[in-house]
Image (cartoon, rainbow, N blue to C red):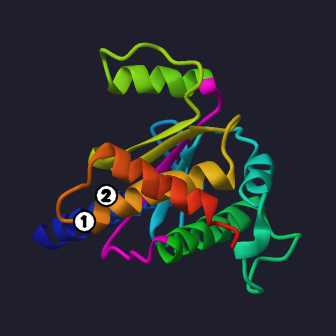
Amino acid sequence: MMRRFGILASAIALAIFIGASAFAADDEMDGAEDGWFILETGRITVYYIPGADLDGIEANLRKRATYFTTDAPSEDAPAEEKIRYQLDALFRRAEEVLDMRPANIHIKIRVFRTRRELNDEYCRIFEDAEPRDDLRSFYINKYSTIYTSEEDITDSIIAHEMGHAIVDHYFAVIPPEKVRELLASYVDLHLAE
């Protein structure tokens, strides 16, 4: 009797493990997290809304392709692969321009569908903030997150915000806002040199 109970308990435990593994594998496969799809690189996690125009995002991330090397994915590679490559290349270039390479940095990028959704998120995060129609992107060090929209994402905007992330992670004491803005603008200005 005990042997049968032990076998039955083992079978149930195995079924639960297999079921849980299947659910975990499904989650990993579609990359969904709370309604967001996920795209990972070595130091960047991108969250985007299902149905996002990845080809459009990818095209906007290579407006100035001079910082890409010959190891770029082929033209017929999936948009996700090209986006991963371009973001890593932008990040390396931003570090190179600033001559700052902070250790153990990992940033997130949240890509909203519209500027309006981005503005709503800004107002949600900063509860007392006035709505802004001109907001195209912003970076929050506390969350190590760049926020932007499909409407506005470009290599310039992402490189500028990456500059903020690099500066904020590089110094033991975060510099004043005007200094951070100057350094982030410097990245965008010298991106294609």
Per the rendering, the mark at residue 171 is: 1
The type of residue carrying mark 2 is: Asp
**Split into 4 quadrants, where in the image is the C terminus?**
bottom right
Q: Are marks 2 and 1 in contact (CB under 8 Å)?
A: yes
Above or below, comparing residue 94 to residue 34 in the picture: below
Secondary element under disc 2, as helix, strand or loop, is helix
Visible in this render: residue 101?
yes
Indicate the position of residue 145 as horizontal and vertical percent values: 41, 48
Crowding at dot 2, Cα within 10 Å, few <14 / some 14-19 / many 20+, comes out as: some
Seen at 56% across and 24% down, the residue is 117
Seen at 31% across and 73% down, the residue is 104
**Split into 4 quadrants, where in the image is the N terminus?**
bottom left
The type of residue carrying mark 1 is: Phe
Of the pair 30 and 14, the residue shown nearer to us: 30
182 to the left or right of 71? left
Above or below, comparing residue 95 to residue 56 in the picture: below
Is 111 in the magenta? yes
Q: Which residue is mark 2?
A: 168
Secondary element under disc 1, as helix, strand or loop, is loop
Seen at 53% across and 72% down, the residue is 97
158 to the left or right of 175? right
Q: Which residues are magenta?
A: 98-115
Q: Quadrant of residue 171?
A: bottom left
Above or below, comparing residue 61 to residue 138 in the picture: below
